Image (spheres, rainbow, N blue to C red):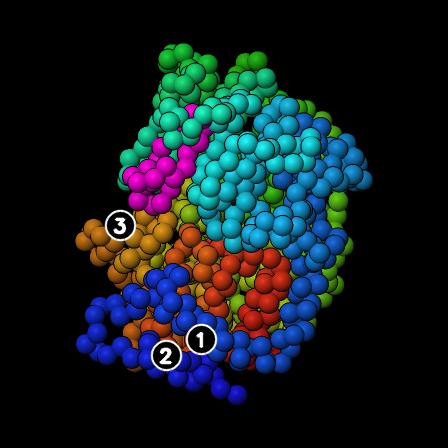
Amino acid sequence: MLRPILALSALLSLTATAAPLTAPEDPYLWLEDIEGARALDQVRQWNAATEAVLTKEPGFETYRSRAKAILDEPRQIAAPSAIFGDQVANLWRDAAHPRGQWRVSPLAAYVAGRPQWRVLIDVDALGKAEGKSWVWHGADCLAPEYRRCLVSLSPGGTDAAVVREFDLGSGRFVEGGFMLPAAKSDVSWVDADTLLVATDYGAESLTTSGYPRVVKLWKRGTDLAAAPTVLTGEKADVRVGPRTVLDGGRRWSFVERGRSFWTCDLYLLAGTRPVKVPVPADADFRDVLGGRMIVSLNAPLTAGGRTFPAGAVVAWPLADIAAGRSSAPELVMAPTPSQAIEEVTASENVLWVKALDDVSGKLFALRRGANGVWSRTAVPLARNNTVHLIEASPKGDLAFVTVEGMLTPPSLYAATPAAPPRLVQSLPASFDASRFTVEQRFARSADGTRIPYFLVRRKGMSGPVPALIHSYGGFRAAQTPSYLTGEPYRAGPLGLFWAEEGNAYVLANLRGGGEYGPRWHDAALREKHQRVFDDLQAVAEDLIRTGITTRGKIAISGRSNGGVTVGAAVNQHPELYGAVISGSPLGDMKRYSHLLAGASWMDEYGDPDKPADWAFLSKTSPYQNIRPGIKYPPVLFYNSTKDDRVHPGHARKMAARLQAYGNRVYYHEYMEGGHAVGADRREDAYRAALLTVFLNRELGGRGK
């Protein structure tokens, strides 16, 4: 059977492989033309060549059909997407409804485990009726009545979405109601007849990152173009958008002006007048409770005669801010050195906080006393698992939380501060967990830092086996272990397939993420990003040192920012790895800031147009560091034409350059699906099968 490099070389004979040594610095710029005829023709040829090889591999159809069955399993957690007073909302996807049904149930019935669902929108049926490939992007319903909603629907899964007003009672879109065309909009209710709207208003209304920079106050029945402007940001800002929070009986409206990815000026609307809030620009606004704005700190703060540590949660009184009076924050919760506060949300009287402790989840319920001191109660949940704070009720003190582990299927609990959590739903096991072991280990990076990782193996396995390491390493995004049928992220049950056939699956917690709070992220910013690649190398070498695997039998996997991670890692140590999976990747760090949303990430990576920043970026940029004469391990790229966040040109150009230098490359680009890749579970199952047989083919996995 022909390897893809042979199958594709003929296809590239007039394109990628034709670039002479005297070609311009980047001979593959034409692949950045997302919908260009020449570029799409190349993509179709690549797709066909990859499918011709991988779909013929042993087990492909078995993996695909089994993945589809797992992903379409009707016994799913019907997780709440929102709580609308005495109702709970959920988006349900299954084999019959791949794009989903948006539905509601009485809250009491839902908590009792006997939900009574009423379907509001069948996304598949709506798309068929309207001739659109709609993908659900969520709904914002006006509290406390929860009658009118703003529904967001994306054409093909892009970040851009159409916004339409919907009546919850009648279950119909409102004729002549609020409506916005497809754009990367931010919209928020002020009252039943007024919205705060940030959208594409035409020329000069967007930032260089492609997001809105103008917020207007739109009254029902008026022309949006003529609506008064509340706040205008600068072109160099990342984005400007509104946010409204209901606290008891009061609705607080804010405008967030993102000056960079990690800094934001926050304004409280006093009437229609924006009042700048005195919080640090690098802090994260979480919620409002009892008239106090809840904020997470990403750097130490000295205020009101006190110093608060990075990672702490603090509160400011909003009434003082609105009145122009000086105010000082108070401490809500400070993490320990092994903790990171990751998720924060408020119910009526309680602040719910989900923290990581050495990457294991914990849940706390906090109340403010009359003396201004916040008390904390740990919610009893299973230890050494991943916890996600899903939703909290604005009326009553109820929070929904999921608990899962790599070998423990997800369970949904209803938590209250006064009683043990109540089990709402628990999924049956999708596989026999007794056949596996999972353990947390720590590797030593080049600078001595301990890097945690999770290792899953089949019991009784001895001697080195092929290993797959999934990682990310950026944007404060912690990589917490989930049930194996969902590992790695956006790869379906690949982790399960890989481990049950006797191989090793690893989830690595590299610096740049949020596993240990701001310090873990800050340690790998900009010129320090090399530490991410060092950390991945350390995990790989620890697996070799401990006899889990051997050099050349390690596959590395990463998506989005993780594409930078695996791209740089394999460039620096091609001999260490045997295969690479790169999903929706960044790769060209010289041009990334000029492609789609790339300009918004310069705080994370640096500005390649500044010589001082390019000096360190140039050393690790995956695309620029692909060299002729070096044998790289086989790479499988997957992405989406409709990705309007990370430009598909990154993956296209890296595939072309690697292949032109004689390396084996597989490439699969979905025509829909956006940054998540794949608009439904049929496509997700297909991708899981492609990835599995790719690993078996290239690493000699035990499923081969």
Q: Crowding at label 1, few (<14), some or many (≥20) Cα neighbours within 10 Å?
A: some
- Residue range in magenta is 196-218
Q: Which residue is mark 1?
A: 45
**Callout 2, which amino acid?**
Leu
- Spatial distance from mark 3 to mark 1, Cα to Cα? 34 Å
Would you name the residue on which mark 2 appears? 12
Q: Counting other residues with Cα less than 10 Å from the Cα at mark 3, is it few (<14), some (14-19), or many (20 or more)?
A: many
Say what secondary structure mark 2 lies in: loop
Locate residue 439 relative to residue 183 in the image: left or right.
right
Q: Is 347 situated above or below 272?
A: below
The residue at the point 22 percent across, 57 percent down is 615
- Within the magenta stretch, is there residue 206? yes
What's the residue at 66%, 50% (across, down)?
A: 125
Q: Return the disc, 3 or 1, that comes first in the chain's sequence.
A: 1
Q: Secondary structure at mark 3?
A: loop
Which residue is located at x 34 percent, y 62 percent? 32
Given the current orientation, which residue lies at the most extreme bottom position? Answer: 1
Question: Is residue 146 visible to us here?
Answer: yes
Q: Which residue is mark 3?
A: 607
Percent position of residue 537, x then y:
42, 64
Lateral position of residue 89 relative to residue 112, left or right: left
Q: Residues within 10 Å of mark 2 (few under 14, many from 20)?
A: some
Q: Quadrant of residue 629?
A: bottom left
Residue 4 % position (x, y): 46, 80
Q: Residue 381 is drawn in which quadrant?
A: top right
Q: Position of residue 439 (x, y in %)?
A: 60, 59
Gap between marks 2 and 1, in whole Å?
Answer: 9 Å
Q: Are marks 3 and 1 in contact (CB under 8 Å)?
A: no
Q: Which residue is pictured at 61% across the width and 29% down the height?
A: 148
Query: Is 571 situated left or right of 85 in this image?
Result: left
